């Protein structure tokens, strides 16, 4: 390989980052998604140096750490809650994304929540700007990146609706002509469902389970609608009746009972956004329907229930976990001014 080719390989890299509450993804132009790890790290108490574990390694330690080690969620509800921990986590992730040699002069596009405040948005920019080898940082709103990632014609003067059910927040957006027309979000999503499942099992069975077990239960047997033919899953936790480990069999409709309130909140959010949508764009959405993305959109029968409630076609993106990262990567060639236009597009000031 010529020297010039090697130089180009490691200079002027184009990188897209989806820094989510549950998962962080790094997309490198020419290589695709090179990193997909949980947004977690384990730190030793009293030490501010390198994390003990990051990403999947940290997730495997949840509920199993020694007394002096703590699992940290550096992002909460879609925004940075712990700047120092986020910075340490991202440095480790970038080292994994570029294992041989760090990039130099990288141009980075990072997705941020559309409802993020200026302070929260600045935190995203600063934490990425501090990474070694980063030359410039551009911001793009999550709904715009997600819409590009699922293939919606957001550049045309036609209405598109995207509902992103993430881990920390659920965001419903109407987009047209490259900008956000209406956007609403609520601080309930996949993590809130896990919390409700934990609470339900404790109240009904006096069984305490961890976050990872609740998430696995939701994935295996959870449903947005009751099922006639229920699925079952054996769950092991701490039995408060006997103060010993215990195992119970949990059915689908029990999980539905636990999370139905959260599902209704999501449906109410979508209905509210549709009520505020201008008539011309409503007609476009009636023809095209609603697209679901994000990890929470994979909840069994959520699309069917939403379609019944709205009377509209509802589809789940083919790769809902990757749509934002891939969409941000697609927008790498977009100018800084156009990306900032997406961030400044009209949207309500309040969060439901």
Image (spheres, grey):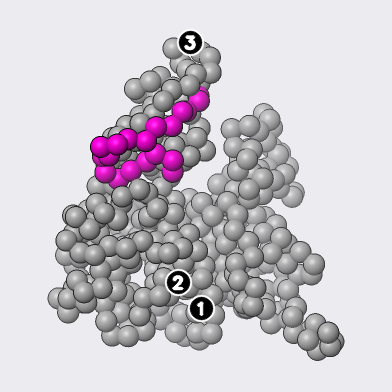
Q: Is the residue 60 above or below the residue 186 in the image? A: above
Identify the secondary structure beneath mark 3: loop
Asked if labels 1 and 3 touch by Cβ distance under 8 angstroms, the answer is no
Q: CA distance from mark 2 to mark 3?
A: 50 Å
Quadrant in which the N terminus is drawn: bottom right
Going from N to C along the chain, the mark reached first, 2 or 3, is 2
Instruction: Report x, y in % for residue 207.
Output: 44, 22
- Could you tell which of marks 2 and 1 lies nearer the N-terminus? 2
Q: Quadrant of residue 31?
A: bottom right
Q: Is residue 214 left or right of residue 183?
A: right
Q: Are marks 2 and 3 in contact (CB under 8 Å)?
A: no
Q: Which residue is mark 1?
A: 330
User: Which residue in the protein does label 2 denote?
Assistant: 149
Q: Residues within 10 Å of mark 3 (few under 14, many from 20)?
A: few
Q: Nearer the viewer, residue 34 or 193?
A: 34
Residue 225 in the magenta stretch? The answer is: yes
Q: Position of residue 214 (x, y in %)?
A: 45, 36
Within the image, what quadrant is residue 272 found in?
Answer: bottom left
Identify the residue at image location x=52%, y=38%.
212
Q: Residue at x 40, y 19 (%)?
A: 206
Residue placed under numbered mark 3 in the picture: 242
- The answer to whether mark 2 and mark 1 are in CB contact below 8 A is yes
Write down the region rendered in magenta: 219-237
For the residues marked 2 and 1, what is the alpha-carbon distance in whole angstroms? 7 Å
């Amino acid at each position: 390989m010529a020297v010039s080719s090697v130089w180009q390989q490691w200079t002027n890299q184009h990188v897209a980052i989806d820094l989510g509450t549950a998962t962080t993804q790094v997309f490198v132009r020419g290589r695709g998604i090179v990193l997909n790890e949980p947004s977690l790290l384990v730190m030793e108490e009293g030490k501010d140096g390198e994390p003990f574990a990051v990403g999947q390694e940290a997730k495997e330690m949840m509920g199993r750490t020694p007394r002096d080690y703590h699992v940290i969620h550096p992002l909460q509800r879609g925004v940075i809650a712990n700047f120092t921990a986020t910075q340490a986590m991202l440095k480790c992730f970038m080292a994994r994304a570029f294992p041989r040699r760090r990039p130099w002069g990288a141009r980075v596009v990072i997705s941020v929540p559309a409802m993020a405040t200026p302070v929260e948005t600045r935190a995203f920019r600063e934490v990425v700007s501090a990474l070694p080898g980063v030359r410039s940082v551009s911001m793009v709103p999550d709904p715009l990146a997600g819409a590009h990632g699922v293939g919606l014609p957001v550049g045309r003067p036609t209405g598109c609706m995207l509902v992103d059910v993430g881990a920390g927040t659920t965001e419903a957006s109407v987009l047209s002509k490259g900008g956000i027309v209406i956007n609403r979000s609520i601080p309930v999503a996949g993590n809130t469902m896990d919390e409700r499942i934990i609470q339900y099992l404790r109240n009904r069975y006096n069984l305490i389970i961890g976050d990872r077990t609740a998430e696995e239960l939701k994935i295996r047997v959870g449903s947005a609608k009751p099922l006639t033919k229920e699925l079952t899953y054996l769950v092991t936790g701490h039995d408060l009746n006997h103060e010993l480990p215990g195992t119970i069999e949990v059915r689908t409709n029990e999980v539905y009972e636990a999370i139905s309130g959260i599902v209704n909140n999501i449906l109410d959010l979508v209905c509210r956004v549709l009520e505020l949508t201008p008539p011309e764009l409503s007609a476009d959405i009636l023809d095209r329907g609603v697209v679901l993305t994000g990890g929470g959109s994979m909840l069994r029968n959520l699309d069917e229930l939403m379609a019944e409630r709205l009377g509209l076609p509802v589809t789940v993106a083919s790769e809902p976990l990757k749509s934002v990262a891939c969409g941000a990567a697609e927008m790498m060639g977009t100018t800084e001014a156009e990306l900032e236009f997406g961030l400044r597009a009209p949207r309500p000031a309040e969060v439901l």
